[in-house]
Amino acid sequence: MSHTIVALATPVGIGAIGVIRLSGHDAIQIAQSVFSKDIRNKPSHTLHFGKIISPIHTASANHLEGEPITQAQVLDEVVLSIFKAPQSYTGENSIEISCHGSYFIQQKIIELLIVQGAQTAKPGEFTMRAFINGKLDLTQAEAVADLIASDSALSHKMAMDQMRGGFSNKIKELRQQLIDFASLIELELDFGEEDVEFADRNHLYNLVSEIHLFVTTLKDSFALGNVLKNGIATVIAGKPNAGKSTLLNALLNEERAIVSSIPGTTRDTVEEAITINGVVFRFIDTAGIRQSGDEIEGMGIEKTYEKLKLADLILYIFDANITNPLELAQEIKDLNVSDKLIIPIANKTDLCDKNKLLLGFSEFANLCYISGKKGYILELTSLLQTHAEKLNQTSQTLVNNSRHFEALHHSAKALEEVMNGLNTGLSGDFIALDIRKALFHLGEITGEISSDDLLANIFSRFCIGK
């Protein structure tokens, strides 16, 4: 981490502005060598307008204000931002150069900075330095990547909550309390022959119980958090010609899936995502469910059942003109997904008496009446909006990272062993061993316990320049 790194922080391509980042001990000195004004003693968090010039075309490396500069030597006019350590994103001296968005200009400036001593940044290296320098813990650093990737209001909210500390601050607090108790138990081991207890077992049990409840609650939130992060997998299922593809097209307001009166038109899954009230719904159109001798259609039906098992929400669509309540109940039962949220959808209601339908299918919860062909899907979209609003209103802290889930799972098991040991009067050395396990896994979450391989794996997934 002793060298100064440089990278383009904005997407590659032509735009109005491009931002180039420098971070490291020599960031200000390196920037000075290509900037037309003296910034060596300027205060942190200040902006400076000037020119980027090529040192190789001048007799002196001191390109200060007032020196004559020929037009041929000027590469661009830029705004340069100064952030001095430790008051910067990385905790190091940092420079951001806002130049014009020409790919040629951006690459030329980066080349000049490399010639002056900077090295090309690796993916996520700026954020890794922020973590190593104590500006962020590991969960906050991971939230940076989630924030960049957020594509809905809810995924943005979860990333922002985590980046601001989220549950990691509470874990650090509880972990420190457990460390304090653990140190007393370790001290007891030094006086094993004298049979003394420095750690109050009742207080320790209450603390471990509190941590276990907190950890278990976080662990159990993973299922919902992961769904909201990646989008609600919403499978559109039903018999052939029920109107599945027509419904998908109506939801998307475009002709995304082929619609035909020939049964079995859809042979493979078709997926598209839309955002409703800040929540991403990933709609999956599937092959119609029926017995088929066609090998290709049969493969499509197998995929339908696979998608049903993985679904978070199922829209089961049926032809309201030819399906009676008993048939519908059996069709839903045959899906063999009783643990899933299923919304039955009566389609083609423009061709039948809706009052009779209301009476006949009144026993089915959440049942919607639509006409996909006519585009009458307001009842369904209103139901999906209500579902999204309920998710948006959750105040629960959610875990959406599989690494966190694994560490929480192991922490909970270790804490259970501690409680069992305290209940059965287990000796202090065994209790201390289980506490060490719990502390290790809790430390993995925030990065207080980490390995080079783990950090390399996490930060390699970041984009270069972040």
Image: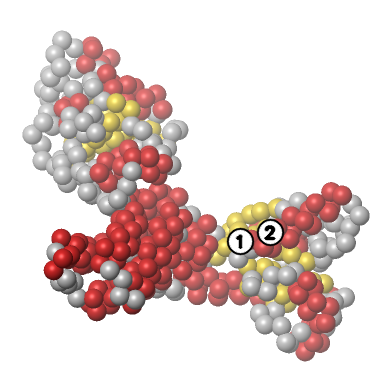
In which quadrant is the C terminus drawn?
top left
- Is there a contact, CB below 8 Å, between mark 1 and mark 2? yes
Secondary structure category for the residue under label 2:
helix
- Label 1 to label 2, Cα distance in Å? 9 Å
Q: Nearer the viewer, residue 308 or 154?
A: 308
Tell me where residue 315 appears, x and y as whole percent.
69, 69
Vertical side of 34 occupied by 292: above or below: below
Crowd tier of the residue under label 2, counting other residues whose Cα lies within 10 Å: few below 14, some 14–19, many 20 or above: many
Q: Of the residues tagged 1 and 2, which is closer to the observer?
A: 2
Vertical side of 377 occupied by 126: above or below: above
Furthest residue toward right: 293
Q: Nearer the viewer, residue 160 or 427?
A: 427
Which amino acid does the dot numbered 2 rest on? Lys
Q: Which residue: 35% across, 37% down?
A: 465
Q: Earlier in the sequence, mark 1 or mark 2?
A: 1
Q: Is residue 431 left or right of residue 231?
A: left
Q: Which quadrant of the structure image shows residue 164?
A: bottom left
Tell me where residue 25 appears, x and y as whole percent.
17, 32
Identify the residue under disc 1.
233
Identify the residue under disc 2.
307
Q: Which residue: 21% across, 31% down?
A: 2
Q: Which quadrant of the structure image shows residue 362?
A: bottom right
Q: Which residue: 24% across, 30% down?
A: 4
Q: Which quadrant of the structure image shows residue 285?
A: bottom right
Which amino acid does the dot numbered 1 rest on? Ala
Q: Which residue: 87% across, 49% down?
A: 295
Crowd tier of the residue under label 1, counting other residues whose Cα lies within 10 Å: few below 14, some 14–19, many 20 or above: many
In which quadrant is the N terminus drawn?
top left
Note whether residue 9 is visible: no
Secondary structure category for the residue under label 1:
strand
